[in-house]
Image: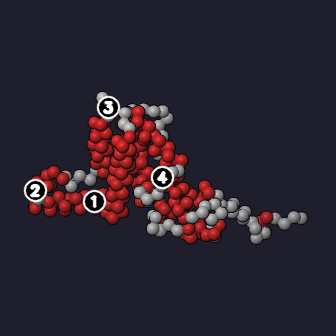
Amino acid sequence: MPESIWLREDASPRRPRLSRERIVEAAVGLLDAEGVPGFSMRALAARLRAGTMSLYEYVRSKEDVLDLALDEVIGEIEEPREPGPWRGTLAGQLTQSRAVMRRHPWVPALTATRPLLGPNALARSRLFYSALARAGLSGPELTAAVGTLSSYVNGFVASENIWWATVRTPAADAEIRARVAGHLNEREAELARHSQVDDGDFDRQFLLGLDLILDGIAARLPP
């Protein structure tokens, strides 16, 4: 009688070989958990229960993995099915970008330091340039508009992520804002009146700042 599989030491099937897709998925999870400072090929291999050197059959370097992971999460931003008005298109893309950067707090650091040349990143860049070009911008003004929008969302979310990583809860946020507001009211009444430091609505602040930038772009469009 043939021996039962349950009586052999190899009862568990062999783990499938690694793939680039599995490596990228694990890299995103590791970056979400540890951030860029905690990312290493050794830690990634441990997450995959594989040998560190086995990763190099699929990628050449740690930088390759970072580029692939970054482009993977950029792909979470859904592209519109068909072209629409430039302002609504860009506002929708940037609002989604903020949501992605909030889910993956390591993204702003990489978008500021890595070449955004992956297929998902290029698709979003093409969308931005095309939308503003159709609206009438060209040359240095077009490039500056795209760069300003990108810098705004990256900077806003980087600050937002650091704030929540430090403060952690809405209750703590409200307490700090109340103390700062009280301090300003005692010493800088005019500044307190204008600065509105007790406003902790990040969603509203983001959209208002975005509107101001889009208004500036609209003012530069040809009649």
Determine which residue is flagged by label 4: 116
Quadrant where the image shows the C terminus: top left
Determine which residue is flagged by label 3: 222
Q: Disc 3 marks which amino acid?
A: Pro
Quadrant where the image shows the N terminus: bottom right
Q: Disc 1 marks which amino acid?
A: Asp
Q: Tell me which residue sits at (41%, 59%) in the image.
A: 109
Q: Name which of mark 2 and mark 1 comes first in the sequence.
A: 1
Q: Is residue 50 above or below residue 20?
A: below
Q: Nearer the viewer, mark 2 or mark 1?
A: 2
Left or right, 3 with respect to 53, comes to: right
Left or right, 51 with respect to 201, comes to: right
Dot 1 alpha-carbon crowd within 10 angstroms: few under 14, some 14 to 19, many 20 or more: some
Q: CA distance from mark 1 to mark 4?
A: 34 Å
The residue tagged with tag 2: helix, strand or loop?
helix
Q: Name which of mark 4 and mark 3 comes first in the sequence.
A: 4
Dot 2 alpha-carbon crowd within 10 angstroms: few under 14, some 14 to 19, many 20 or more: few
Q: Disc 4 marks which amino acid?
A: Leu
Evaluate if marks 4 and 3 touch, with contact meaning CB atoms under 8 Å apart: no
**Residue 198 locus on image (x, y percent):** 21, 54
Q: Mark number for residue 73?
A: none
Determine which residue is flagged by label 1: 173
Return the residue nearer the eye: 68 or 171: 68
The residue tagged with tag 4: helix, strand or loop?
loop
The residue tagged with tag 3: helix, strand or loop?
loop
Determine which residue is flagged by label 2: 189
Q: Name which of mark 3 and mark 1 comes first in the sequence.
A: 1
Q: Name which of mark 2 and mark 3 comes first in the sequence.
A: 2
Q: Tell me which residue sits at (77%, 66%) in the image.
A: 6
**Residue 218 locus on image (x, y percent):** 30, 36
Q: CA distance from mark 2 to mark 4?
A: 45 Å
Q: Name which of mark 1 and mark 4 comes first in the sequence.
A: 4
